[in-house]
Image (tube, rainbow, N blue to C red):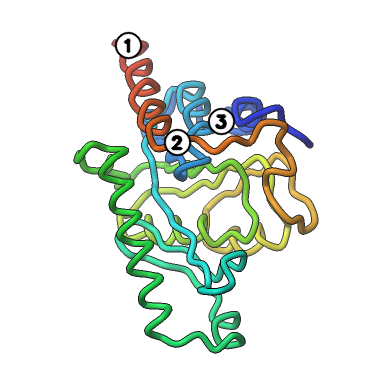
Amino acid sequence: MYFRDRADAATELVRRLSHYANNPTVIVLGLARGGVPVAAEVAPALGALLDVFVVRKLRLPGYEEIGYGAIASGGYQVCDSSVVEQLRIPDEALEAIRDREFRELQRREQIYRGGLPPVSVNGRTVILVDDGILTGFSMRAAIVALRPHHPARVVVAVPVAPNVSLRKIEQEADEVICVDARGMFRAVEEFYEDFQVPTDQEVTRLLLSTNLRASAHTA
């Protein structure tokens, strides 16, 4: 399946998430940045609160096209050690990459939330939304980072993903919903007509405007 844009992809996701509509325990987390425009459509359609979840991919020095893992809020990370071992990347280089990406993660969290703490997920059903999955590192890192905060249930919802990555995520999430699960592909953007990456300012605006609309609706 091909999507016009992230809003179109969100429409397809909402249809598959209807059993979570109007449930006060549900919270929708959009993976920044590309997952936030999708989540900003999903959350109000379900009558749920929206928040952002920041994850940064870890890429090898000199091999920037190769991702070997991801780091999420709280410093939790998921890595493919076989790639690191095969390329013999020194530990100090890996530590430098991790530190750099964690600093960028913290910077973005500050921008998106304006210093406010994240919404509590304790005892809640958390729907993690992204605009697509390729390797699955980012989504898996998000799940790992959420578990210590004791959500009642972690649901992964994405428009498109390869089956091989979904199988790994299914081992860590409580439920996985994917509109178009298929064989391996090269890039998520292949399935979108419009795949312009939102800016930090657009992410911040979406978070604020979506929750303001939700508050007005429930007032």
Q: How far is mark 1 from mark 3, CA to CA?
A: 23 Å
Quadrant of the rendered image containing residue 83? bottom right
Q: Which residue is mark 3?
A: 19
Q: Which residue is mark 2?
A: 199
Q: Residue at x 44, y 48 (%)?
A: 153
Check whether the beta carbons of the residues at disc 1 and disc 3 lie within 8 A of each other: no
| Mark earlier in primary sequence (3, 2) | 3
**Could you tell me the amino acid type at mark 2?**
Thr
Left or right? Give the position of 38 relative to 190.
left
Check whether the beta carbons of the residues at disc 1 and disc 2 lie within 8 A of each other: no
| Mark earlier in primary sequence (1, 2) | 2
Q: How far is mark 3 from mark 2, CA to CA?
A: 32 Å
Q: Residue at x 60, y 58 (%)?
A: 170
| Viewer-proximal residue among 70 and 28 | 70
Q: Secondary structure at mark 1?
A: helix
Above or below 14: residue 128: below
Q: How far is mark 1 from mark 2, CA to CA?
A: 26 Å
Q: Which residue is mark 1?
A: 216
Q: Secondary structure at mark 2?
A: loop
**Could you tell me the amino acid type at mark 3?**
His
* Residue 87: % across, % down: 59, 85
